[in-house]
């Protein structure tokens, strides 16, 4: 049984119940959160963060099902997942897999995300 | 940011010096969860580390009192500290070099004495901080910086040693067993005696590069996953499997070391009170 | 028994010259140096001993194992000397005064722990009862081979150390209290270099009636609860030691560190840390200077010694005086920081030490105005005899050389 799920599923639960917050300037682009997430929540930034990595960000917070795997696996304390204080109204549109899935072409592999980032790192 | 990190860690030391994809930060996250679920405050827990990746990367990340001892001697320092400050919880977070190589003598004697600390031996199967040489826990045959023809020395599991020396709580997990590790560390912290938790984790920069042939963070964590469950991701059997879980639980069954000393002091002083001051001669 | 009338001045520069006058009520015992060292530590408030038995310091461990539970302290028998000193460092970090005792073979194992304690400004007292070497040497014979090792007690340089040496059982008692006081005031490790003779011999020992009366002279343990935990770029002393376990958030590190205690890799930080570790001792050397001097005002040849060697050397000096030689005697009690100021006289020096390779003599050669006037009289495994010392003093005073004496080493190069 694989650890990482490269094919993302659509969430079955109602959408918009979970807060997912990444401190992007602490992210070192390991890729664990994106690859262990069963649904489509994360994607890579295309520009480097303050410590020189192409960080992860949260384009589709609505898809989060609250499994907390990303929170457990992040090695850099970047991720906070918690129930939203005020959930968005029930029955809001479920995200269509076809419409909103970040395409494979837009994904960077872990190697590419690591690629040139050390060159752009400058200590403050 | 992770709320527990904001609650317990030292802001100036985050982001840590760890490499990207390093398992040390993951394990520290689980330690914070265990500490939080037990309701412990920052000034009730003292962190001790050693030298090497686990020592350097966890050192000073804890916001409360912490110490980074010389290589292999964190447990010796903890012995003295526990006697002086017995009411705190001690988390001694050391690597496989610190615990199973240079500091094994102190590990054995702390287990023998049933010192009331929890040792988390975070094992990346080599001396990764110095570049990736093999260690006493490197699996057989693997190529490392100092075993270019394959690891020929037999390796061992520090859990067996600590159990034989008398530890009252011994457990092993890996970096893909987050919930289990949190539960096990909670139990370990509640043992008023010597607890040993052995957590294997990936190193993609050095062990991954030389032993596994890839620095890819995902592949390295998958290697840990495969050897935890005994099957590769495409269904074949792995070359070996780690036995994980609680290996020995005799929590709170033996008196703790600093308590033994305090009890002896009480006995001696009661005797002195009975017999009078005496002539002071030895 | 005739008492030698000296007719020359005698001077002792040490705090216990005054302490012995203040505390005159107590018990007189016939006891060994190790017993006096133990009682001195207990009197100073030491409550933790962690060590490994080794001749001739074994008795200190045994006495401590008996005495510490009586005063609410903790005796821990470590698996080796390195663990022992680390345990003491941990206990001192936790707020208890701690001490360990060893001999040469164990002392060299403690280098790692020395560095850790010194760089983190942890107060500790370490007793090294030297014996002849190298390595195990002769178990039951005195030596003075760790003069430099006690100063250069760890790797990496960039430190200064405090080393003291007693020469009698009574002095061992007071000097140990003094060592603990210096450790508290300077937040460092103080080494007491004694030897097999002083440790094992039995002599008259006076102990004050009640150690609580010594509260005036004992520096108590205080706790530093605020930043900066390590006042870098400062040479201040009397800074309270740090404590782990009071929620101050202190970091104790093996690396070059910041004021908070975590590691930092910058040249400025290295300078600031070294400035503190070296200058807190160098800039306050007058607080540490202790010595004994006899007949220096008109001396043409000055015998220099410390520890057990100084006992017979002093008598040898008095004998030489009786023979008409204008001999003086200088006994170093504080060995490090080395007191260059004591060697400003342009006289001849006869350095008597219990080793053959010459250690103290090198420092005297460096400090004296003319190193050609510094003579070395080394002997190993036995103390210098009074006859040998008197003959050497005569030789140096009258013919500028030490006469041929069996088993006396005179070469330094």
Image (spheres, coloured by chain):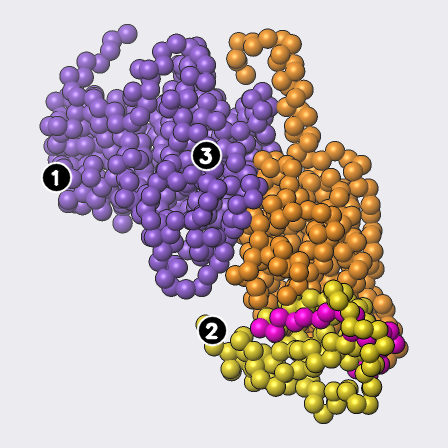
Q: Are marks 1 and 3 in contact (CB under 8 Å)?
A: no
* Shown colour of chain A: yellow
Residue C358 horizontal side relative to residue C327, left or right: right
Q: Residues within 10 Å of mark 3 (few under 14, many from 20)?
A: some
Q: Is residue B54 above or below residue C125?
A: below
Range covered by the magenta-colored residues:
A4-25
Tell me how far mark 1 sits from mark 3, CA to CA.
Answer: 45 Å
> Magenta-highlighted stretch: main secondary structure?
loop
Q: Residues within 10 Å of mark 1 (few under 14, many from 20)?
A: few
Magenta stretch holds residue A8: yes
Q: Residues within 10 Å of mark 2 (few under 14, many from 20)?
A: few
Q: Nearer the viewer, residue A120 or C84?
A: A120
Tell me how far mark 3 sits from mark 2, CA to CA.
Answer: 39 Å
* Shown colour of chain B: orange
Residue A51 pos. (x, y %): 54, 75
The residue depicted at 41 percent of the width and 22 percent of the height is C215
Q: Nearer the viewer, residue B259 or C127?
A: B259
Residue C274 pos. (x, y %): 36, 53
In the rendered structure, find residue C346 and report the number of the disc placed on it: 1
The residue depicted at 64 percent of the width and 66 percent of the height is B1
Q: Is residue B10 above or below residue C40?
A: below
């Amino acid at each position: 049984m694989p650890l990482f799920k490269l094919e993302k599923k659509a969430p079955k639960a109602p959408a918009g119940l979970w807060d997912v917050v990444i401190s992007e300037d602490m992210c070192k682009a390991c890729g664990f959160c994106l690859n262990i997430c069963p649904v489509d929540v994360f994607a890579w930034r295309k520009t480097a963060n303050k410590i020189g990595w192409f960080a992860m960000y949260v384009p589709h917070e609505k898809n989060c099902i609250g499994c907390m795997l990303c929170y457990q696996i992040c090695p850099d304390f970047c991720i906070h997942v918690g129930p939203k204080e005020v959930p968005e109204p029930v029955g809001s549109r479920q995200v269509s897999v076809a419409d909103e899935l970040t395409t494979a072409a837009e994904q960077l592999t872990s190697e590419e995300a690591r690629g040139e980032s050390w060159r752009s790192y400058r200590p403050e | 940011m992770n709320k527990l990190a904001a609650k317990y860690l030292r802001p100036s030391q985050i982001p840590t010096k760890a490499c990207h994809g390093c398992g040390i930060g993951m394990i520290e996250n689980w330690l914070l969860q265990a500490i939080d679920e037990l309701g412990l405050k920052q000034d009730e827990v003292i962190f001790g580390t050693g030298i090497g990746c686990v020592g350097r990367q966890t050192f000073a990340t804890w916001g409360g009192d912490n110490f980074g001892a010389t290589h292999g001697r964190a447990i010796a320092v903890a012995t003295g500290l526990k006697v002086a400050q017995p009411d705190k919880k001690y988390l001694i977070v050391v690597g496989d070099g610190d615990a199973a190589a240079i500091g094994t003598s102190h590990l054995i004697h702390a287990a023998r004495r049933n010192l009331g600390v929890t040792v988390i031996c975070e094992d990346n199967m080599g001396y990764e901080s110095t570049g990736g040489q093999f260690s006493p826990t490197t699996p057989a045959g693997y190529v490392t910086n100092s075993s270019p023809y394959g690891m020929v020395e037999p390796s061992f599991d520090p859990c067996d040693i600590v159990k034989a020396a008398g530890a009252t709580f011994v457990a092993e997990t890996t970096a893909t067993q987050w919930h289990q590790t949190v539960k096990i560390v909670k139990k370990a912290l509640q043992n008023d005696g010597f607890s040993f938790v052995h957590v294997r984790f990936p190193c993609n920069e050095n062990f991954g590069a030389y032993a596994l042939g890839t620095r890819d963070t995902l592949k390295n964590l998958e290697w840990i996953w495969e050897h935890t469950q005994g099957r590769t991701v495409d269904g074949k059997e792995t070359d070996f499997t780690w036995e994980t879980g609680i290996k020995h639980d005799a929590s709170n069954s033996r008196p703790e070391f600093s308590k033994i000393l305090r009890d002896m002091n009480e006995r001696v002083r009661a005797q002195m009170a009975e017999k009078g001051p005496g002539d002071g001669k030895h | 028994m005739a008492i030698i009338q000296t007719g020359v001045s005698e001077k002792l520069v040490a705090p216990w010259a005054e302490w012995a006058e203040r505390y005159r009520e107590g018990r007189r015992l016939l006891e060994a140096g190790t017993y006096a060292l133990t009682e001195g530590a207990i009197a100073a408030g030491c409550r933790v001993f962690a060590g490994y038995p080794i001749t001739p310091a074994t008795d200190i461990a045994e006495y401590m194992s008996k005495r510490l539970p009586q005063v609410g302290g903790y005796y821990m028998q470590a698996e080796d000397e390195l663990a022992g000193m680390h345990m003491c460092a941990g206990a001192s970090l936790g707020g208890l005064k701690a001490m360990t005792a060893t001999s040469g073979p164990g002392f060299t194992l403690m280098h790692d722990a020395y560095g850790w304690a010194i760089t983190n400004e942890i107060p500790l007292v370490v007793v090294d009862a030297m014996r002849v070497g190298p390595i195990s040497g002769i178990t039951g014979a005195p030596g003075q081979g760790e003069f430099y090792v006690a100063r250069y007690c760890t790797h990496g340089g960039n430190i200064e150390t405090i080393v003291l040496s007693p020469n009698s059982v009574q002095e061992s008692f007071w000097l140990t209290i003094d060592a603990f006081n210096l450790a508290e005031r300077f937040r460092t490790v103080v080494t007491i270099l004694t030897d097999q003779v002083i440790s094992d011999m039995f002599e008259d020992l006076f102990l004050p009636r009640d150690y609580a009366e010594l509260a005036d002279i004992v520096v108590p343990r205080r706790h530093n609860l605020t930043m900066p935990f390590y006042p870098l770029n400062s040479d201040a002393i009397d800074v309270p030691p740090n404590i782990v376990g009071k929620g101050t958030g202190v970091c104790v590190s093996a690396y070059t560190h910041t004021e908070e205690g975590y590691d930092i890799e910058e040249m400025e930080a290295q300078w600031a840390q070294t400035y503190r570790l070296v200058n807190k001792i160098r800039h306050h050397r007058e607080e540490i200077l202790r010595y004994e001097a006899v007949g220096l005002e008109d001396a043409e040849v000055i015998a220099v010694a410390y520890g057990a060697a100084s006992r017979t050397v002093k008598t040898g000096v008095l004998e030489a005086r009786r023979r008409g030689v204008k001999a003086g005697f200088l006994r170093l009690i504080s060995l490090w920081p080395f007191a260059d100021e004591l060697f400003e006289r342009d006289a001849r020096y006869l350095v008597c030490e219990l080793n053959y390779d010459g250690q103290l003599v090198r420092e005297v050669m460096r400090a004296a105005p003319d190193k050609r006037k510094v003579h070395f009289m080394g002997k190993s495994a036995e103390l210098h005899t009074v006859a040998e010392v008197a003959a050497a003093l005569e030789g140096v005073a009258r013919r500028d050389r030490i006469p041929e004496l069996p088993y006396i080493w005179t070469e330094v190069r």
